[in-house]
């Protein structure tokens, strides 16, 4: 009985000792885990601090670069504005010099009264042709649009204007021909150039394309014949370009007829 008791007590002591050892091991493990947790926490905090610092540096860098970009753009716009101003002043100076040259040249041309009268009559033709050109350009826009039928009213107005200009052109052309015969003391070169100018304009103003536009466009527009309408539009553009070219290509004394009219008109306004 005593042996059993001793064995039991020994067993209890062994278990107690084993329990103590287990508790010690558990405490060691807990301390180890806590230390590792602290290290991880510290590492994470350091990483977050570094990331925050990087973000702040990147934000500051972006702000600096953006400010530099804005400053550079402002500087560039300022330089461009200054360059445009200088170019505009240069263009104005060139235009002024050109106007002085043209005015001087025109003064020389119209020193002879007979020549002046011939050129004045020719300028009336130029005015008529310019109005015709504008109407043809408008017709081109209406005819090549997606819905030309929507512009029937505008087309009618421009056709009426063109027919009116054709009648005026015919009358003025006849009048100029009379001036050519009557103004025998006019500068021969001026008369020759005006005759050539008139001849080229007459070819365009009496062309088959213009006759067809005036006679058939409204009819085909009412029928909705898109292909023909667009063809008339292209013809109108071609004629407008041709009339414009004649006004700028035919020149006397280095001055195209279009510029000649502009300068003479300005002289009349001043007078």
Image: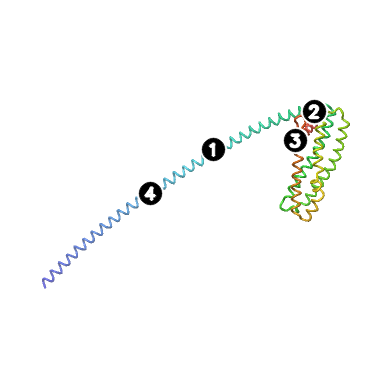
| N-term-proximal mark, 3 vs 2 | 2
Residue at 71% across, 52% down: 146
- Relative to 191, 226 lies left or right: left
Residue at 69% across, 30% down: 94
Q: According to the image, label 3 marks what residue?
A: 249
The residue mark sitting in front, 1 or 4, is: 1
Q: According to the image, label 1 marks what residue?
A: 72
Q: According to the image, label 2 marks what residue?
A: 109
Is residue 40 placed above or below 78 in the rendered structure? Answer: below
| N-term-proximal mark, 1 vs 4 | 4
Q: CA distance from mark 3 to mark 1?
A: 46 Å
Q: Secondary structure at mark 3?
A: helix
| N-term-proximal mark, 1 vs 2 | 1
- Relative to 126, 62 lies left or right: left
| N-term-proximal mark, 3 vs 1 | 1
Number of residues whose C-alpha sits closer than 10 Å to that of mark 4, classed few (under 14), some (14–19) or many (20 or more): few
The residue mark sitting in front, 1 or 2, is: 2
Q: Position of residue 242 (x, y in %)?
A: 76, 41
Assign the C terminus to one quadrant of the image. Answer: top right
The residue mark sitting in front, 3 or 2, is: 3
Specify the farthest residue to the left. 2
Q: CA distance from mark 1 to mark 2?
A: 54 Å
Number of residues whose C-alpha sits closer than 10 Å to that of mark 3, classed few (under 14), some (14–19) or many (20 or more): some
């Amino acid at each position: 009985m005593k042996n059993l008791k001793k064995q039991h007590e020994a067993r209890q002591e062994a278990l107690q000792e084993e329990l103590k050892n287990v508790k010690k091991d558990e405490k060691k493990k807990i301390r180890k885990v806590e230390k590792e947790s602290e290290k991880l926490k510290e590492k994470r905090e350091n990483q977050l601090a570094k990331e925050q610092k990087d973000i702040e540096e990147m934000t500051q860098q972006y702000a600096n670069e953006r400010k530099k970009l804005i400053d550079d753009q402002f500087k560039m716009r300022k330089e461009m504005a200054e360059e445009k101003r200088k170019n505009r002043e240069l263009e104005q100076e060139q235009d002024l010099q050109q106007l002085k040259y043209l005015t001087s040249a025109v003064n020389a041309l119209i020193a002879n009264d007979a020549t002046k009268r011939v050129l004045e009559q020719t300028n009336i033709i130029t005015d008529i042709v310019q109005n015709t050109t504008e109407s043809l350009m408008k017709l081109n826009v209406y005819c090549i649009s997606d819905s030309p039928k929507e512009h029937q009213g505008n087309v009618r107005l421009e056709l009426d204007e063109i027919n009116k200009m054709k009648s005026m052109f015919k009358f003025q052309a006849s009048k100029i021909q009379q001036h050519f015969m009557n103004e025998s003391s006019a500068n021969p070169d001026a008369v020759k150039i005006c005759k050539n100018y008139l001849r080229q304009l007459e070819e365009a103003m009496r062309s088959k394309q213009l006759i067809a536009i005036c006679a058939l466009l409204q009819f085909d527009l009412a029928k909705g014949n898109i292909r023909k309408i667009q063809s008339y539009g292209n013809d109108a553009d071609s004629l407008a370009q041709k009339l414009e070219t004649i006004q700028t290509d035919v020149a006397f004394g280095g001055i195209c007829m279009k510029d000649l009219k502009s300068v003479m008109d300005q002289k009349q306004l001043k007078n």
